[in-house]
Amino acid sequence: MGKKSGASIDAVLQDLQSVIGMLPEEAQKNEFLTVLQRMINVMSELREAIALVPTRERVASEGIPEGLKRIRDFMKAFESGSTRGRSRSQAKTVDEAKIAGFVEQLRRMPEAELRVLVQKTKLGKPEWIAAVKQAGGYTTSKDTIDTLKHRLVQEIVNRRTHEGILGDAQP
């Protein structure tokens, strides 16, 4: 039994010595630690980068989809041609036939009824601009809806007066 345990101790010691032989030298260990630290730094940067990636919920809560829609709508105006010289509200589409019918209806009304109807009518600024132009008037980018209403009435009344003075004569 003594011989058996002696051989076994020698084998264990030999195994330990081979394990010690596999241990790295100090320079190798330091190189390994340096490489490992670099990998940790890269992984840490990757973690930080992933943390900065926005989520659908964050994007929605900050109103970004609506902002993108506004930008897309704004850019569409440039696809169809220049908007230079036109205000933002004038760039919107207006039903020209509807406006022409409205102006024609106003032209046939007595002045008092014309003024009342214009004041009661609810249209957006682009429609009022189109109505003034349909009646032969001018607009500016700073005109308010009230200014446009007044200008429309004045244009129709002035044209009636002018046509009445001239009668059948052509200017």
Image (spheres, grey):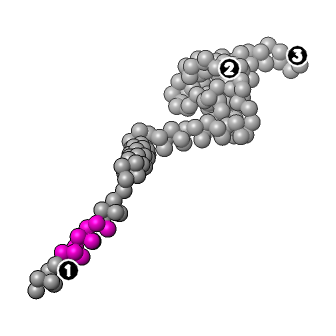
Q: Earlier in the sequence, mark 2 or mark 3?
A: 2
Which is closer to the viewer, label 2 or label 1? 1
Amino acid type of disc 3? Pro
The answer to whether residue 60 is visible is no
Which residue occupies the foreground of this view, 109 or 56?
A: 56
Residue 11 in percent (x, y) is at: 24, 76
User: Which residue type does callout 2 highlight?
Assistant: Thr
Question: Which range of residues does the magenta coloring cover?
Answer: 8-18
Which residue is the extreme one toward the bottom?
A: 1
Magenta span: helix, strand or loop, mainly?
A: helix
**Which mark is drawn over residue 171?**
3
Badge number at residue 7? 1
Q: CA distance from mark 1 to mark 3?
A: 133 Å
Looking at the rendered structure, the kind of residue marked 1 is Ala
Decide if residue 108 is on the left or right side of residue 162: left
Q: Which residue is mark 2?
A: 139
- Residue at far left of view: 1
Image position of 122 with respect to 34: above or below:
above
